[in-house]
Amino acid sequence: MPRALLSVSDKSGIALLAHGLVTRGYEIVSTGGTARALTEAGVAVTGVSDLTGFPEMMDGRVKTLHPALHGGILARRDRPDDLAALEAHGIGLVDVVVVNLYPFAKAAANPDTPFEALIEEIDIGGPSLVRAAAKNFQGVLVVVDPEDYPRLLRQIDGTPTPEFRFELMRKAFEHTAAYDATIATALAAVDVEERRFLRTIGVPFPKDATLEFSLLPVRDLRYGENPHQKAAWYVMGGRGLAPPSGLGAAEVLQGKELSYTNLLDLDAAVRIVLEFDEPAAVVIKHTNPCGAATGDAAADAYIRARDADSLAAFGGIVGLNRPIDAATAEAIVSTFIEAVIAPSVDGAARAVLARKTNLRVLTTDFSLLRLAEREVLDIEFRSVLGAMLSQQRDRVIEARRPWTAESLPEGLRVVTRRPPTADEWEALRFAWRVCAHVKSNTVIFTDRQRTLAVGAGQMSRVDAVNVAVLKAGSSGRALAGSVAASDAFFPFRDGLDAVATAGAVAVVQPGGSVRDAEVIAAADERGLAMVFTARRHFRH
């Protein structure tokens, strides 16, 4: 009788798998909570202790570390001497190993988990079983991901292919590598004081270079930034560890093969619409918004964003923070759009979008992204020549709640004689949330609900204003009565004068220049209201 060892922390689907294995003639060996769960599900289980002749001990610290298990896993099926050794010691073969590991990442993410409890979440027997089975992958099927359970059953109905065995082996080592990296990263934030081990929550960067994730392949991409560059898409994380989110968990519903730049633009789109609780949409070109807007519904927001610069919107990337319905889909397919991402797409909208067969349509769970927004540590990595950079993700926390004269977040202050009106406060907050996601140097002009002109990625703020004015003119849009946002301070009054000449009546900027007094005086001369945020939002 073939034998399967099942010992999992994530018990989703395990009873169904066990029933499938039993009907295919397998003996099920298990221990601890997995054995109890299977017994309750009506599966006959052989206890590990029955197999090894030794009871679990030390509160479960020792239960599967025994030759009776590891011998049956590691024995090479094509080596008569290995098989003879098993027979001499009365050890049976183990053909399938299904293991995933203690939820260390979940315990480490909780700042209230004491160090002693965290140590107990370090799995010892599980990684040993996984690594042993993976090493002997040509004779043992090792499964660490519940999503592979149906494939496992289909494969053992015939003869498992070498490709399937090798894929499972790779996943197994990825799983244990990510698990160990997570442990190393968590322990890097532990201080030793007078023989006490104290966890220091809030330290964003580890003391060494061990990363807390592995890169798991999603798919090859159409090409990189240019057709002659090859590219690939990976998800950050480890199977059974923290769930992926954002583009790491995106589902591609339709469309042409994705390119590297498509994904960069989709990322830029999601970052902007996540700033808004109300329905919001953005059209992205080259990671910059050519239009962003809010509205009463997704369709309304999208049309405003598209029409903010309809010429530039051609061939753009669209992001929405609401599900796509039929009305929104009709608006999207009315012009040429390369790709769109949203939390979901309803059935009627899918039929509309399908009319544009090349349009790439992706969905991702925005609730997971908003959960990540609340995490203390949200680290981003970026490669440079011969090195890796790391930083905390930039968040526009000062604009999370409305700005009013009566209630301003800490750090915000009116620095001009004239304060903003109620409408200007609303428009300034809108502009500030979008401005933070435009390539620096940037100055943008908006009203309360949409961008009017975007001056992105210029070498000076005056240039940024001039580009925005040029864009507004080409769209036939006047900037009189608008508000402006600058991602960093104005180093001279010329930038502020250019904003005023363009027609803006209020401006928001971080402040902090040695010439702030000069810039404030210029704003007072021109009758502008100006707000300092004391927080810069460069984006390189």
Image: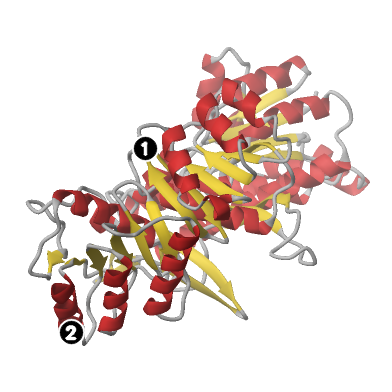
Q: Is residue 530 left or right of residue 205?
A: left
Q: Which mark is residue 518?
A: 2
Q: Is residue 18 above or below residue 91?
A: above
Q: Which mark is residue 378?
A: none
The answer to whether residue 286 is seen in the rendering is yes
Which amino acid lies under the numbered mark 2 shown in the image of this protein? Glu
Q: Nearer the viewer, residue 72 or 349?
A: 349
The answer to whether residue 178 is seen in the rendering is no
Q: Nearer the viewer, residue 39 or 50?
A: 39
Residue 491: x and y in percent read 29, 83
Residue plotted at (56% across, 55% down): 312
Q: Is residue 307 left or right of residue 143?
A: left
Which amino acid lies under the numbered mark 1 shown in the image of this protein? Gly
Residue plotted at (43% across, 60% down): 472
Q: Nearer the viewer, residue 91 or 447?
A: 447
Q: Is residue 437 above or below residue 493?
A: above
**What is the quadrant of the N terminus in the image?**
top right
Residue indicated by mark 1: 295
Between discs 2 and 1, the one toward the N terminus: 1
Q: Is residue 12 left or right of residue 296?
A: right
Residue 334: x and y in percent read 61, 36
Residue 139: x and y in percent read 83, 41
Q: Secondary structure at mark 2?
A: helix
Q: Secondary structure at mark 1?
A: loop
Residues under labels 2 and 1: Cα distance?
38 Å
